[in-house]
Amino acid sequence: MKRLILCLCGLLAGHAADAMEVRQFDDPAKQERYETLIKDVRCLVCQNQSLAESDAELAKDLRTEVYNIIESGKSSEEAVQFLTDRYGDFVLYRPPFKSITLLLWLGPFLLLAGGAVFLWKQARRRAEAAQQEEALSAEERRRLQQLKDRFQG
């Protein structure tokens, strides 16, 4: 059993090592910007993986592009602009707030507000139904009084 666990750990560690590339910059600030940027950019091939995590060929190419952009002295914003110009806002985990992404940003709040309004209307409808059941009309009160008089003699 220990051998099986060790084999599985070895396979997982080997797979994780494949996805990692070591890129060195002469400036630690550039290194940090590069690592932050590749963690914030989505892999276009893999589901829910960043460029840093993905071992897809396209992700490797994009890491190289980002490395070259950062190495050439350009800013992180210019690197993001390069990627969004090519692949759109989908490449970003945190897309910008603009008209095309409005539903993405406001959708959860709209759903929450819609749910709150629905629950409030249901509660109000039930309260009104309960009030209508309790209230008797004049005709119903007259008939009720007749029944009481008949049974009481």
Image (cartoon, helix red, strand yellow):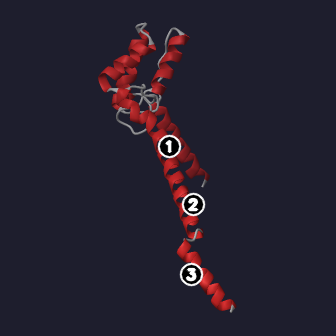
The disc, 3 or 1, on the residue closer to the chain's N-terminal end is 1
Question: Residue 16 appears at what percent x and percent y?
Answer: 49, 35
- 135 or 21: which is nearer to us? 135
Image vertical order of residue 72 relative to residue 44, above or below: above
Residue pointed to by mark 3: 143
Q: Is residue 101 rendered to the left or right of residue 145?
A: left
Viewer-nearest of labels 2 and 3? 3
- For the N terminus, give its image quadrant: bottom right
Classify mark 1: helix, strand or loop.
helix
Could you tell me the amino acid type at mark 3? Answer: Arg
Residue pointed to by mark 2: 127
* Mark 2 surroundings within 10 Å by alpha-carbon count, few (fewer than 14), some (14 through 19), many (20 or more): few
* Mark 1 surroundings within 10 Å by alpha-carbon count, few (fewer than 14), some (14 through 19), many (20 or more): few
Classify mark 2: helix, strand or loop.
helix
Q: Kindly identify which numbered label has been placed on residue 113.
A: 1
Could you tell me the amino acid type at mark 2? Answer: Ala
Q: Quadrant of residue 103?
A: top left
Classify mark 3: helix, strand or loop.
helix
Q: Which residue is at a point 36% across and 23% down the rendered structure image? A: 62
Question: Residue 101 appears at what percent x and percent y?
Answer: 38, 31
Residue 49 shows in this picture: no
Could you tell me the amino acid type at mark 1? Answer: Ala
Question: Residue 153 appears at what percent x and percent y?
Answer: 68, 92
Q: Quadrant of residue 41?
A: top left
Q: Which residue is at a point 58% across and 49% down the rendered structure image? A: 5
The disc, 2 or 1, on the residue closer to the chain's N-terminal end is 1
Image vertical order of residue 1 relative to residue 81, above or below: below
Which residue ends up furthest to the top in the rendered image?
Answer: 73
- 139 or 55: which is nearer to us? 139
Which residue ends up furthest to the right in the rendered image?
Answer: 152
